[in-house]
Image (cartoon, rainbow, N blue to C red):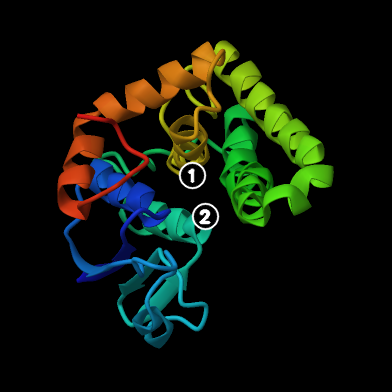
Amino acid sequence: MLTLHHLNNSRSQRILWLLEELGTDYDIRAYQRDTNTSRAPAELKAIHPLGKSPVIEHDHLVIAETGAIIVYLLDQFGADADGNCRFRPDKGTQDYVDYVHFLHFAEGSAMLPLLLALYTGFLGDAATPIQPMIMDEIRKVLDYCEYTLIRNEWFAGDSLTGADFAMIFPLEAAKARGRLKGYDACNDYVERVWARPAYRRALERGGDYDYGPRS
């Protein structure tokens, strides 16, 4: 059995969404953030030394990091009835290159300025000198996402792929903080993801999630 170690209000929500889209049987071991610090509980370090979520366990393997988990799950459970991998474009195509790109871009580039804005917000006036640079980097990320989504329905072409399971969290985080104003394609993208039945099932299974749709 596959087990997802799921932390509330975290990146692991998008792994829940992927699992629901795949229709794979899985168990959830749920963890709650500390109400004072918002940090993950120490118990997660017993699963993986980083003490972060998402982490999955399957066939005696432990896999951490969202991108690595997405690749693993598609390798293990992505095949359709004809043996073709769902949610992964054919190799040798531009869509495949874009799939790999955005799978890494989500954490390698998109999340960094958003996290910097969050963390420096705790510093008050001390962060004033670097705020313009951080805001400029956020604009670059969102402009790039908008550029991509104006041209394609999804991040790697006209079909849902693993890239979208990675990219939804940065856009949800930006939207939750009011940063998607004026980004019509990004907003439409998030709303389309939120409307998917598998996404709704993931919300039901995962519990509280502050970055999801307001109901």
Q: Along the horizontal axis of the image, is 76 left or right of 147?
A: left
Q: How would you rate the neighbour count of disc 1 (Cα within 10 Å): few for under 14, some for 14-19, many for 20 or more?
A: many
Residue at figure coordinates x 28%, y 41% from the top left:
80
Query: Residue 3, position in %: x, y?
Result: 25, 69
Q: Earlier in the sequence, mark 2 or mark 1?
A: 2
Q: In the image, is 17 to the left or to the right of 141?
A: left
Q: Residue at x 45, y 81 (%)?
A: 48
Badge 2 crowding class, 10 Å Cα cut-off, few under 14, some 14 to 19, many 20 or more, is many
Left/right placement of residue 130 relative to residue 97 reads right
Cα gap from disc 2 to disc 1, whole angstroms: 7 Å
In the figure, residue 187 lies in which quadrant? top left
**The N terminus, quarter of image:** bottom left
Mark 2, secondary structure of its residue = helix
Helix, strand or loop status at disc 1: helix
Q: Name the kind of residue labelled 2 in the image.
A: Gly
Q: What residue lies at 53% left-to-right and 23% top-to-bottom?
A: 180
Q: Position of residue 31 (x, y in %)?
A: 28, 69
Q: Kindly identify which residue carries mark 2.
A: 67
Callout 2 touching callout 1 (CB < 8 Å): yes
Pinpoint residue 32: horizontal percent, then vertical percent.
29, 67
Q: Amino acid at mark 1?
A: Ala
Residue 166, label in figure: 1
Q: Nearer the viewer, residue 91 or 173?
A: 173
Q: Which quadrant holds the C terminus? A: top left
| Residue reaching furthest to the right | 129
**Could you say which disc has been placed on residue 213 in the image?**
none
Residue at 75% of width from left, 36% of height from top? 137
**Horizontally, is 81 left or right of 51 in the view?**
left
- Displayed quadrant of residue 47: bottom left
